[in-house]
Amino acid sequence: MTYIKDLKDFDGQEVTLKGWVYNQRGSKSLYFTIVRDGSGLCQCIISQDDVSEEVWAAAGTLTQETSLAITGKVKKDDRSVGGYELHVTDMKIIGASDDYPITPKDHGTEFLMNNRHLWLRSQRQWAAMRVRNTIIFSIHQFFQERGFMQMDAPVFTGNAAEGTTTLFETEYFDQPAYLTQSGQLYGEAMAMAQGLIYTFGPTFRAEKSKTRRHLTEFWMVEPEMAFYDLDMNMDLAEDMLCYIVDKVLDKNKSELEVLERDISKLEQIKKPFHSMTYSEAIDQLKSVETESMLNEMFTSREEEQVQLKKEIEDLDKEYGQAKKGRKYRIDARKKEIHDRQNQIEEDLRNIPVWKKNIESLKWGEDLGGSDETILMMQFDRPLMIHRYPTEAKAFYMKKDPENKEVVLAVDVLAPEGYGEIIGGSQREDDLDELLHMIEKHDLPQEVFDWYIDLRRYGSVPHSGFGLGVERTVAWLCGLKHVRETIPFPRMLGRLHP
């Protein structure tokens, strides 16, 4: 058996592919069958003159997602998908597929989510999962090359890491337990043993949020480093993101093409990233420049809306007299326009709300999703915002020795409106200060006894951060919603399939 991705090594040779029918069209004596095998797509040409009567009859029964074994001669053809095609000499159906529910026509999101187990076979979903694989593998490569050890944090915990309001509670035999919000606290203990570690696993947040950026179950990589301060932490995060982007651009050119991703925007992701303090970010949001940008954006969206409406009217007039090929292009263009109109309508609804949120934003409040979006409209590379207000952040973050009103924390925002993809900080290493913050946050000290011990026995400055895999996949793939970034997404109200 040969895989489609390896056909370049078998030019002129006879091979057997095993896969599924992706699409088929034909004439009286030829079938052009697109086969997928998980590694790629291949056009297989079935000629009545080249196969037996039995095979020709079977070819006429092929339906979408029928599984088969198909044998033929490999021929290079730059016009074909993947650059190679198969001239078929034999074929055997393995499993029939009747009335496959996901067809080339448009389907609603709810329908596709209910059929996620099948939607994964679609080309865009296939491409997104392969990019996800590259991202995950490159994360491991990055840390392993730098002497980090991967270690695993428990999924069941007895304490909160990111506040108690988003905990999933369960019963652990005769005592309450929670699904982990983060591996960080355990990561700190591991770093005190190994120096440089990272955890990689699922995390859970019971946020009742339906935004395009949120999942209730998602994956995080969380490095923790002994003897690292905030600046070193930020440097590591910057290096890691550049490394990941470079790997995706190198390994996933065809997948990014399938996703219609503008790679020129990814090619700009180089050091140094933009950087500002939280206070500077507040000033930027409330600046005349930001207000002007939003006003211009609103006006341009209104003008574009009028232009697109006129284009739709012109295309509708042309459609009745158009030939079949032109009708196909008109339908495709109208779909693009409708998608763009939906985005424009969303922007026109959002911009007044964004402006109102900025007016009411006060120093000391955490930045919201819309605040992050507005800031990132002004940058083409990630933005690192650091030194957040103490009151807005978690108990374990170390206060800035030069200004106790802020902590040594950093969030990294992705460009193009994808929001926060990294959150990190220098951790509080002083025993008395940590005890004070646990009490101030009204947390039960007894469940943190082991965590407090880390400050009793050889405490050192240390730092770490967490990268959300799904938001990173969404950003690099150019996907609008994180539900397409993980094989089986868990969201508010979504537990099936």
Image: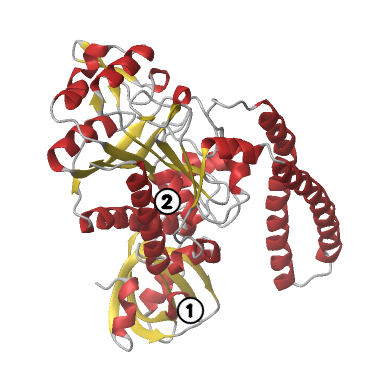
| Count of numbered badges drawn on the protein | 2
Instruction: State the separation of the CA atoms marked 1 and 2.
Output: 23 Å
- Helix, strand or loop status at disc 1: loop
Residue 188: x %, y % from top left: 23, 34
Q: Residues within 10 Å of mark 2 (few under 14, many from 20)?
A: many
Q: Which residue is mark 2?
A: 120
Q: Indicate which disc, 1 or 2, sits on the residue closer to the N terminus.
A: 1
Residue that appears at 24% across and 25% down: 156
Question: Nearest the camera: 371 or 121?
Answer: 371
Let me know if residue 329 appears in the view.
yes
Q: Where is residue 13, by image quadrant?
A: bottom left
Say which of 232 and 128 sits in front: 232
- Residue 484 percent location from the top left of the image: 47, 47
Q: Residue furthest front?
A: 402
Q: Quadrant of the N terminus?
A: bottom left
Residue at horizontal 42 percent and vertical 45 percent from the top: 470
Residue 292 placement, left or right of 419: right
Residue located at (37% from left, 21% from top) = 167
User: On the rendered image, what quadrant is the C terminus found in?
Assistant: top left
Residue that mark 1 sits on = 80
Asked which secondary structure carries label 2, the reply is loop
Residue ID at (84%, 69%): 321
Q: Looking at this rendering, what residue extends furthest in the bottom direction?
A: 12
Rendering coords of residue 439 (x, y %): 33, 12
Residue 190: x and y, percent?
A: 17, 36
> Disc 1 residue type?
Ser
Q: Residues within 10 Å of mark 1 (few under 14, many from 20)?
A: some
Q: Residue 260: tell me if it is visible.
A: no
